[in-house]
């Protein structure tokens, strides 16, 4: 397990951990935006991003004069989410921090799939309607293609991908699995397209729209 030490030391740095947390939203972010969210200088953010890129935790693409950063893939997001479950987060200080924590717990993107209470509600609804089965903490598609068609999900197209069709990703706030894999990504994309969910500009929390609240898939207790 000694090969874990270099990666663990990178993630252990609070500033790099914050950068990775911001990238869990699944949206490419310029280095300048990461610097602003982490409260550091752009030059310092560039140094941290370079170290994360060298460790293959993030990818950097140049778009003109701007450098955009993303996580290296869903495997990094799932590892970070799992680590978050092991951590004992400090209590939020101040109203802004409290509201941010509550927004993340309500609905957020875990790289490219839905997490938080809304993600758990979606998983429960799919299991209750027979679209998914859950056993020993793992999901499997039950074969109800018509139900997924209603959600705008092309199961045959997803099955043709090299990525696993469905995976259970342990939710760090709810301590239960939400739907990941190619299916989880397609579901989140469809809900954003339908206008049931809306991305926020201040982080990876998602807003459930009035139309989304009318959908039985996203009824959050």
Image (cartoon, rainbow, N blue to C red):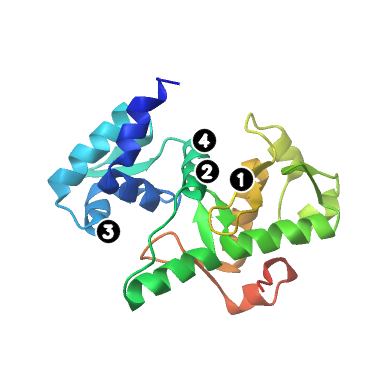
Location of the C terminus by quadrant is bottom right
Q: Name the residue under label 2.
A: 82
Which disc, if any, is residue 169?
A: 1
Q: Tag 3's secondary structure? A: helix
Q: In which quarter of the image is residue 93?
A: bottom left
* Label whose residue precedes the other's in the sequence (1 or 2): 2
The nearer-to-camera label among 1 and 2 is 2
Q: Tag 1's secondary structure? A: strand
Q: Mark 3 points at which residue?
A: 37
> Given contact means CB atoms under 8 Å apart, are the residues at marks 1 and 2 in contact?
no
Q: Position of residue 5 (x, y in %)?
A: 36, 26
Q: Distance between the residues labelled 1 and 2?
A: 8 Å
Q: Where is residue 127 in the image (x, y as percent from the top left)?
A: 80, 55
Can residue 122 be spotted in the picture? yes
Q: Distance between the residues labelled 2 and 3?
A: 23 Å
* Label whose residue precedes the other's in the sequence (3 or 1): 3
Q: Where is residue 35 in the image (x, y as percent from the top left)?
A: 22, 53
Q: Mark 4 points at which residue?
A: 75
The reply, left or right, for residue 102 in relation to residue 48 is right
The nearer-to-camera label among 4 and 2 is 2
């Amino acid at each position: 397990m000694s090969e874990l030490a270099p990666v663990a030391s990178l993630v252990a740095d609070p500033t790099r951990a914050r950068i990775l947390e911001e990238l869990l939203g699944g949206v490419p972010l310029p280095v300048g935006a990461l610097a602003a969210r982490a409260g550091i200088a752009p030059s310092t953010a560039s140094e941290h991003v370079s170290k994360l890129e060298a460790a293959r935790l993030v990818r950097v693409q140049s778009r003109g004069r701007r450098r955009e950063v993303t996580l290296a893939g869903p495997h990094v997001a799932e590892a970070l989410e799992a680590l978050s479950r092991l951590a004992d987060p400090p209590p939020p200080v101040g109203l802004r921090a409290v509201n941010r924590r509550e927004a993340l717990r309500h609905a957020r993107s875990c790289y490219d799939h839905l997490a938080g209470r809304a993600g758990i509600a979606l998983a429960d609804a799919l299991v209750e309607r027979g679209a998914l089965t859950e056993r020993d903490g793992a999901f499997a598609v039950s074969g109800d293609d018509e139900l997924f068609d209603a959600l705008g999900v092309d199961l045959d197209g997803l099955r043709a991908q090299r990525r696993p069709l469905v995976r259970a990703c342990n939710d760090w706030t709810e301590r239960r699995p939400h739907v990941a894999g190619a299916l989880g990504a397609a579901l989140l994309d469809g809900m954003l397209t339908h206008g049931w969910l809306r991305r926020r500009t201040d982080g990876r929390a998602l807003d459930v729209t009035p139309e989304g609240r009318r959908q039985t898939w996203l009824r959050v207790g």
